[in-house]
Image (spheres, grey):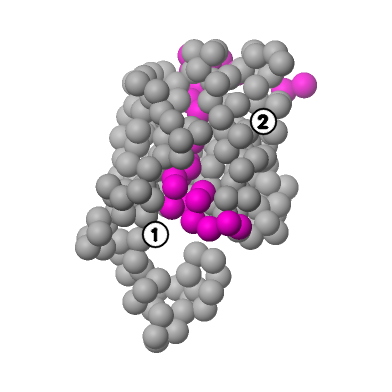
Amino acid sequence: MSPGLEPDRTCLLLFDFLEGHANRDAAARERYRPVIANAAALAAAARAAGAMVAYANADHRADHGTVARTLRDTDNRLRPLTVENRGESHKPAIVAGTREARIVAELAPQAADYIVPKHRWSAFRGTYLDLALRTRGVHTLVLCGGSTDVGIAATAFAARDFDYDLLIISDACTSPEQDNHAQFMKRIFPRMARVRTTAEAIQMFGIRP
């Protein structure tokens, strides 16, 4: 049995649960459905326990003014970049102020929650997240969302470098590449975090079914 969480020193971070990701197409909706349900259960447990709840959301300018052109071989989904599509690969998937940038209705924020706009994969880079956590005295981050091998991974590595205790919820994270998801949950995240299921995390918040 994992030790319990201290709710007043814990934050549940819901990462990129946005319409443009979760409802992009039929396949995305099917993949996200159980993940969103688990995230909603986590949010209910966190709020009931009195923990901080925060949302990290992609928030890019339509003119690409927040997106850097970096050298790489593929796009985020491992599709090779060519001369023809290289320019397209740097366009932001989510543009601020659009329907795609809205948090899914099932996870609608409450008035006391923190909304953290982000412009990079990590929820820490260039945001006020670390300041808000330290102001609240938070030392443990409970992380869920997508994609496991992109934004979740970047945020997890940053949290480790900031010396936060980290709990990553395996069945409340998702990636289009399920082999990548499994690899991170089994072989990468355990080096820096406790990897637990939604049911286990809810019990750690002190909430009984």
Q: What stretch of residues is rendered in magenta?
A: 1-27
User: Could you tell me which quadrant the C terminus lies in?
Assistant: top right
Task: Where is residue 175? Give x, y as percent.
Answer: 60, 54
Q: Is residue 42 left or right of residue 135?
A: right
Residue 191 visible here: no
Residue 178 versus residue 7 in the image, above or below = below
**Which of these two is toward me, 190 or 161?**
190
| Label tally | 2
Q: Which mark is residue 198?
A: 2
Work out which residue is located at the far bottom of the displayed protein and give it: 83
Task: Where is residue 177? Give x, y as percent.
Answer: 63, 60
User: Could you tell me which quadrant the N terminus lies in?
Assistant: top right
Residue at disc 1, secondary structure: loop
Q: Which mark is residue 43?
A: none
Q: Amino acid at mark 2?
A: Thr
Residue 176 versus residue 131 in the image, above or below = below
Q: Which residue is mark 1?
A: 93
Q: Amino acid at mark 1?
A: Ala
Q: Are marks 1 and 2 in contact (CB under 8 Å)?
A: no
Quick check: is 134 in the magenta stretch?
no
Task: Where is residue 105? Give x, y as percent.
Answer: 46, 35
